[in-house]
C-alpha cells in the first residue's frame, strides 16, 4: 500500500526487512516490476514468479503528447525517479510531492507555488477525461476526502489510461496509473498549467 500523507522514510517489504524508497525502487527494477521511459514510449516490464519477462510498449496518443516546456518538465521529473520521499524536501537527497513539481517546473524556467494547495489553483481546472501530459492531478489522504494532501504530474495519456509521476511517501519518486483503485478513490481534481 502507498501512503499519500505523512512522512515514512522506510517501509517493510514482504521479507520483513525495512528498506528506503531508493532501495525499493531498485528491488522493483530488478525483481517483479520495472518501468523506464524510452523516447516517447514507456516500456513496462513485468516478471511473474518463475516466469519470463513480458514487455508492453505504451505509446502516447498524438494529441496527448507533451510538447515544449511541458515535455521538459516531465523529463526533469522522471530524472528524479528513485529519489526518496522527504517532507519539505527540494533536493535529490529527498523530495515531497509539491517539491518535485516545483523543481521540475523551475528547471524549465517556470515558477510555480510551493504547496499542493497553492498548486491546485495555479492554472485552469480540467476534467479527468480531458487530461494531457503536463497536467497536475490532486489527491486526498483517504478515499472520498476533499482536502488536498498530494499532487502528481501527468506523464502519459494513451489508450491504456493515464500515468502520473509523484513523490510517494513510501516509495519516493515513482510513476503510477491514475486508474488504480487506490488513486481513483482519492482523486480530487486536475489543473492545466497556464504557461
Image (cartoon, rainbow, N blue to C red):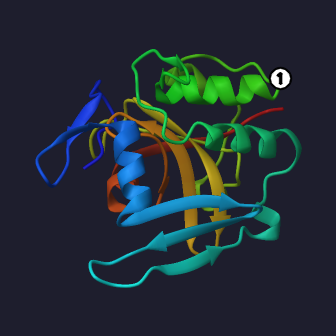
Farthest-out residue, left: 16
Q: Secondary structure at mark 1?
A: loop
Question: Which residue is at 81% across, 65% downward?
Answer: 63
Tell me where residue 94 appears, x and y as whole percent.
Answer: 47, 23
Please indicate, yes or no, whether residue 2 appears anywhere in the rendered image: yes
Q: Residues within 10 Å of mark 1 (few under 14, many from 20)?
A: few
Tell me where residue 2 appears, x and y as whole percent.
Answer: 30, 45
Relative horizontal placement of residue 31, taking residue 111 as reference (left or right): left
Residue 72 appears in which quarter of the rendering? top right
Question: Which residue is at 48% across, 57% downward?
Answer: 178
Observer-nearest of 35 and 118: 35
Question: Which residue is at 57% across, 29% downward?
Answer: 100
Relative horizontal placement of residue 182, taking residue 89 as reference (left or right): left
Observer-nearest of 78 and 122: 78
Question: Which residue is at 70% across, 54% downward?
Answer: 132
Residue 99 vs 2, above or below: the answer is above
Observer-nearest of 147 and 3: 3
Tell me where residue 57 appears, x and y as whole percent.
Answer: 63, 76
Residue 163 vs 18, above or below: the answer is below
Tell me where residue 67 appears, x and y as whole percent.
Answer: 85, 50
Relative horizontal placement of residue 36, taking residue 82 as reference (left or right): right
Residue under circle 1?
Answer: 109
Please indicate, yes or no, whether residue 159 appears anywhere in the rendered image: no
Residue 38 vs 23, above or below: the answer is below
Q: Quadrant of the C terminus?
A: top right
Residue 67 vs 59, above or below: the answer is above
Farthest-out residue, right: 68
Count how many numbered circles sit on residues in the image. 1
Amino acid at each position: 500500500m502507498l501512503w499519500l500523507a505523512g512522512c515514512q522514510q522506510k517501509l517493510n517489504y514482504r521479507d520483513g526487512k525495512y528498506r528506503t524508497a531508493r532501495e525499493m525502487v531498485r528491488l522493483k527494477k530488478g525483481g517483479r516490476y520495472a518501468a523506464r521511459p524510452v523516447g516517447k514510449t514507456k516500456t513496462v516490464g513485468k516478471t511473474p514468479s518463475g516466469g519470463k519477462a513480458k514487455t508492453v510498449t505504451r505509446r502516447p496518443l498524438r494529441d496527448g503528447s507533451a510538447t515544449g516546456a511541458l515535455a521538459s518538465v516531465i523529463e526533469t521529473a522522471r530524472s528524479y525517479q528513485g529519489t526518496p520521499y522527504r517532507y519539505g524536501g527540494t533536493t535529490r537527497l529527498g523530495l515531497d510531492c509539491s517539491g518535485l513539481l516545483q523543481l521540475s517546473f523551475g528547471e524549465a524556467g517556470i515558477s510555480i507555488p510551493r504547496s499542493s494547495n497553492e498548486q491546485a489553483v495555479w492554472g485552469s481546472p480540467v476534467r479527468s477525461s480531458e487530461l494531457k501530459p503536463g497536467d497536475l492531478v490532486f489527491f486526498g489522504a483517504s478515499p472520498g476526502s476533499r482536502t488536498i494532501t498530494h499532487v502528481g504530474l501527468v506523464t502519459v495519456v494513451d489508450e491504456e489510461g493515464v500515468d502520473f509521476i509523484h513523490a510517494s511517501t513510501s516509495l519516493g519518486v515513482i510513476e503510477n496509473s491514475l486508474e488504480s483503485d487506490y488513486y481513483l478513490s482519492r482523486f480530487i481534481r486536475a489543473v492545466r498549467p497556464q504557461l
